[in-house]
Amino acid sequence: MINPFSKTYDEDQLLMFDFMQGIKFFERLRQKEMAKFIPAMHHRKYVRDEVVFFSKDPSQALYLLKKGKVNLTIDIKDNFETIMEVSRGEAFGENSLLENAKRTYTALIVSEEAELIVIPHFAIQEIFDSNPKIKAKMMTSLAEYYNANNQRLFRSYRESFGFFSLRQMFE
């Protein structure tokens, strides 16, 4: 039975919810929880070779990729090594969900153009402060994301015959 007093959403909001639902950090949220992020979203366009942010910058926003491709790179000596390519429907800048975090990688646009949805860190923290259930759900997704990354790192380490010291990761 449909509740006649429940909030209804317009077509654009429903499309945004469908998009957000496919992104790891929002997968546990209901529509009314996702709706809290919509006023904080800023739509930005980028072109090839634009840097979204640099490694060691303050983590000031979470980025949702609507169109294009972004490479996440780490600096190794004077070179950039791509650690991941992000495509439509994925997020990056996930450590903006944490307080006082710095970027661990550089984000570079590699498609001719890209459209990103930017959610500022301060807006995320305001939502978390007033909605502990949203924070708990998103932190669970973040923990799962980091756990999966650790598993990939350890698998890569085993397959590379230990060309780097894994101990340094935990120091």
Image: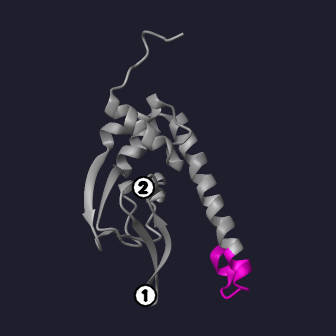
Find residue 62 and report its horizontal and vertical position in percent: 40, 54
* Residue occupying image coordinates x 44% and y 36%: 34
Query: Is 167 contained in the magenta span?
Result: yes
Foreground pick, 159 / 143: 159
Find residue 97 and report its horizontal and vertical position in percent: 47, 52
| Residue at image mark 1 | 79
Report if the CB atoms under discs 2 and 1 are less than 8 Å apart: no
Q: Label 1 sits on what residue type?
A: Asn
- Is residue 166 positioned above or below 148 on the image? below
Q: Label 2 sits on what residue type?
A: Arg
Find residue 103 and report its horizontal and vertical position in percent: 43, 67
Label placed on residue 169:
none
Give the quarter of the image for residue 59: bottom left
* Residue occupying image coordinates x 48% and y 58%: 95
| Residue at image mark 2 | 88
Find residue 75 and report its horizontal and vertical position in percent: 45, 82
Q: Can residue 154 be seen in this view?
A: yes
Q: Is disc 1 placed on a helix, strand or loop? A: strand
Q: How crowded is mark 2: few (under 14 residues within 10 Å), some or many (20 or more)?
A: some
Span highlighted in magenta in the image: 156-170
* Residue occupying image coordinates x 49% and y 48%: 23
Q: Is disc 2 placed on a helix, strand or loop? A: loop
Give the quarter of the image for residue 114: bottom left
